[in-house]
Image: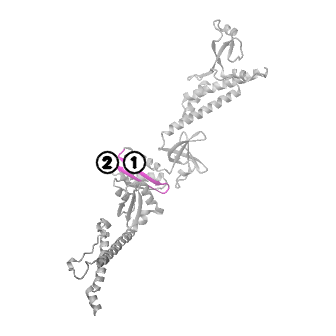
Amino acid sequence: MNQEFIEALKLLEKERGVEMEMLIEAIEDALVAAYRREFEIHSRDRDKAKSHDAGSDESSEHAPENDGITAHIDRQTGEMRVYQPITIVEKVRNPHSELSLEQAHALSPDLEIGDQLVREVDPSHFGRLAAQTAKSVINQRLAQAEKVRIHEEFSGRVHGLASGIVQRRDRNEVLVDIGRAQAVLPYSQQSRLDNYTFRKHMRFYILKVDQRDHHPVIIISRSDPGLVRRLFEQEVPEIGAGIVEIVNVAREAGSRTKMSVTTNDSNVDPVGACVGQRGMRVQTVIAELNGEKIDIIEWNADIVEYISNALSPARVIRVMLSEDEDERSARVIVPDHQLSLAIGKEGQNARLAAKLTGWRIDIKSESQYREMLEATWMADFNEAVAQDEANRELYEEDELYNDDMDDDEQPMLEYDEVPPLHEIVGDNKEAASTYLDILENTIDSIEEMEDDTPPAGDVSSQKGE
């Protein structure tokens, strides 16, 4: 029987993952609690015949707390023993813990009052209530040991992968068996492409180890970007070896993921390593995510190139960064026919690119950008023309402006208010050409107006006639 008890403990250790020594200690504590329970029952039965005038002080003297009772289980044979210290007293009040001097001398004449003996108790004589107490203590200790084990085991696996089998759906949550523990998949961490059917095997991302109703709960996810990162780490050996590095992952679970990668080896193509031969590696990850689209782009230290890559598959013509670096915003120009592709359905492509790069991205088509430039140029030009006309009026009113002055002494009109061409158009040749066309047309119009106006002298002579 005792050998069967040891084998049962070993089996329990294997199933629950609780060390056998911890199980034995729990049973020893249970035996002590069971004996105290038995001791209290016997004391109550014995005291029924006594006077009910005994106060709480006397009862406290008989209380079994801190009474030195111990239990021991042989680790080899499984034999159980309970020991209780017996104190030699002059007058016995509690026969379970005290012994008279006369009885002590029957054992040994050298014993005196105050000495202590240890008595062995047979646990098989415990009653039903004592056995229930022992069972309760064992279950409590097992639950406590399992809490500690789960917390220690999975705290070190947070932000890692776990394979599990779907057990059942509880309201909006999905309960998953991930080995020695049960995990919870909240609704907010589920992917709309997943079908959580009973007994389905899936891989999950461990978010954290939480507490619920004083029990450890493992929170897992199927929507976190870390899931994509860990799946690629498993599928791509170059990532595990440190040759290829995943810089960032931006994800909208159940729809699309963008991932930027780089390498420290110039002979390795980081995008090609993640895609794999004939796309086998990336297709394995896509299959695990039930068809979620994945864009793999190459990270670049040049933020202009990085933003251009992040908007893939759209083709980018130009990226203009804001002058304020703290603002971290960029304006991107794309061909007219690729504007919708760059923005994506409901703005998804632009939104994921912004998450991936950490920059605010404003996307404009070529025609939209040209209209903005023309509006800006015309506003500046109109302002310059208005200023020129104001200057002309001032010169006409000045006394230096008369017919007696030679032509070479006439004051020249100043166009300092017109912004320099390079400040308006920068290095955009197409924009410069457009600006020059507008400027030439405007100058031609002004010259035609001046040609049609007769000289001032002619006007005076006509009035005199």
At 53% from the left and 55% from the top, the residue drawn is 192
Q: Secondary structure at mark 1?
A: loop
Q: List the single residue furthest toward the top.
A: 109
- Residue 12 drawn at (x, y percent): 57, 32
In the rendered structure, which segment of residues is drawn in magenta?
A: 242-265
How is the protein colored in the picture?
one colour
Q: Is residue 71 left or right of residue 419?
A: right
Q: Is residue 356 above or below residue 122?
A: below
Q: Amino acid at mark 2?
A: Asp
**Which element is circle 2 on?**
loop
Q: Nearer the viewer, mark 2 or mark 1?
A: 2
- Name the residue tied to disc 1: 236
> Residue 80: in sight, yes or no?
no
Query: Does the stretch in magenta take in 375?
Result: no
Residue that numbered label 2 is attached to: 265
Q: Amino acid at mark 1?
A: Val
User: What numbered label is drawn on residue 357?
Assistant: none
